[in-house]
């Protein structure tokens, strides 16, 4: 549901484009219920064309991976007509493309989606956010199960995605940045691996800063791994701070999540000291399927402060 809620800025962005195109202030649902099939086709193509702007809100899959804008628009309009874009709709579109007489694939896709919306709208009766949200949750849960299950880094990625979209709504954009780009999986920076990474983009789509997040989990109560994991985080901090001090690249923020029933207290204190943001959850990772509300609010505040510029990274040591 967090990921479904994180799609609301994208929904509102499409709504604003529909209002701009039709010169009205109607809701997206009202516009889709009454405008012509050609107008809906034009709206879908407009959404694709506007995706080149870096401040366009993102859409994420069931484990918090950012869709390309091309796929995001396609999935969004397929979802609002309650269809499965990959399993059921894509084979039909492929056949339609082959029989289109040479039309561009994007146009065939837009025309097909517009026709579906017009055909289904008398049955569906609403394209409002609440019913669309329910469809999104169902579709995202399916992709979540098929992708990776509920590993700790997936839960953290989901929480970060939610925090980014909450900040987007509060700041009416990405603050001092033009856009964001969330890595699909683990990234390697200066010889150190990070489970979740967010690029914060300046003018022209260049990476100006990065938020890097190692996620460490341990199912058993044995505390021996705490030193090793803490050393890993400390090494990561030193590597990225040194890289930032040398210049010529982006500035870095380091956040860390530790999910374990037993972690040496002095090691926890050390990680908290070196990180810009830190979460320590004394629980078995097999029971970790979401962030509690207080921790999510802390993460939301951290992400918002980074985007707005109201805090600065901790210095290297």
Image (tube, rainbow, N blue to C red):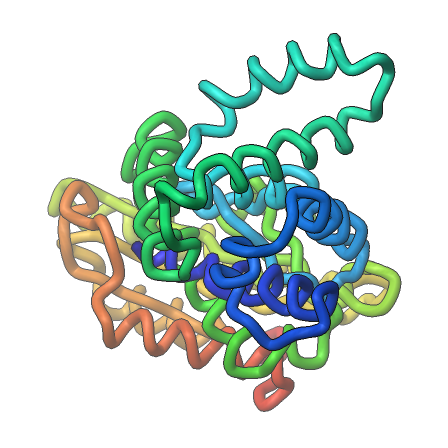
Q: Nearer the viewer, residue 260 or 38?
A: 38
Q: Nearer the viewer, residue 33 or 280?
A: 33
Residue that sits furthest to the bottom in the current view: 310
For the question of whether residue 236 can be seen, the reply is no
Percent coordinates x, y for residue 45 in the rendering = 75, 46
Number of numbered tags placed on the structure image: 0
Q: Nearer the viewer, residue 12 or 175?
A: 12
Percent coordinates x, y for residue 229 in the rendering = 37, 50
Relative placement, left or right, of 4 versus 44 is: left
Residue at left offset 75%, top offset 70%? 178
Residue at left offset 59%, top offset 69%? 253
Percent coordinates x, y for residue 119 in the rendering = 49, 35
Percent coordinates x, y for residue 201 in the rendering = 75, 64
Vertical order, 6 against 253 (above or below)? above
Relative placement, left or right, of 106 versus 171 is: right
| Snapshot quadrant of residue 175 | bottom right
Vertical order, 85 against 67 (above or below)? above
For the question of whether residue 281 can be seen, the reply is yes
Residue at left offset 62%, top offset 45%? 73
Relative placement, left or right, of 196 versus 141 is: right
Vertical order, 123 against 1 (above or below)? above
Relative placement, left or right, of 172 versus 202 is: left
Q: Nearer the viewer, residue 173 or 74?
A: 74
Residue at left offset 61%, top offset 65%? 13
Vertical order, 263 against 37 (above or below)? below
- Say which quadrant the C terminus sits in: bottom right
- Say which quadrant the N terminus sits in: bottom left
């Amino acid at each position: 549901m967090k990921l479904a809620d994180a799609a609301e800025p994208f929904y509102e962005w499409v709504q604003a484009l529909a209002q701009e195109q039709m010169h009205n202030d109607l809701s997206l649902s009202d516009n889709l219920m009454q405008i012509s099939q050609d107008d809906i086709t034009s709206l879908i193509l407009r959404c694709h064309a506007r995706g080149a702007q870096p401040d366009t809100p993102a859409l994420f899959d069931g484990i918090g991976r950012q869709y390309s804008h091309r796929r995001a628009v396609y999935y969004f309009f397929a979802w609002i007509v309650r269809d499965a874009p990959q399993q059921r709709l894509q084979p039909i579109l492929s056949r339609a493309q082959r029989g289109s007489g040479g039309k561009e694939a994007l146009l065939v896709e837009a025309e097909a989606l517009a026709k579906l919306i017009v055909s289904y709208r008398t049955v569906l009766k609403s394209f409002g956010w609440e019913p669309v949200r329910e469809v999104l949750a169902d579709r995202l849960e399916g992709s979540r199960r098929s992708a990776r299950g509920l590993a700790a880094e997936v839960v953290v990625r989901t929480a970060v995605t939610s925090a980014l979209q909450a900040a987007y709504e509060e700041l009416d954009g990405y603050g001092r940045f033009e856009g964001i780009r969330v890595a699909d999986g683990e990234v390697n920076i200066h010889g150190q691996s990070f489970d979740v990474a967010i690029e914060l983009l300046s003018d022209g789509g260049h990476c100006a800063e990065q938020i890097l997040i190692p996620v460490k989990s341990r199912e058993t109560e044995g505390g021996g791994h705490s030193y090793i994991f803490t050393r890993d985080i400390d090494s990561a901090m030193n590597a990225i701070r040194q890289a930032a001090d040398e210049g010529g690249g982006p500035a870095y923020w380091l956040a860390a999540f530790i999910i374990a029933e037993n972690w040496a207290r002095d090691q926890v204190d050390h990680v908290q000291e070196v990180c810009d943001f830190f979460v320590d959850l004394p629980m078995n990772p097999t029971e970790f399927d979401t962030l509690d509300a207080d921790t999510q609010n802390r993460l939301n505040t951290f992400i918002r402060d980074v985007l707005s510029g109201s805090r600065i990274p901790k210095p290297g040591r």
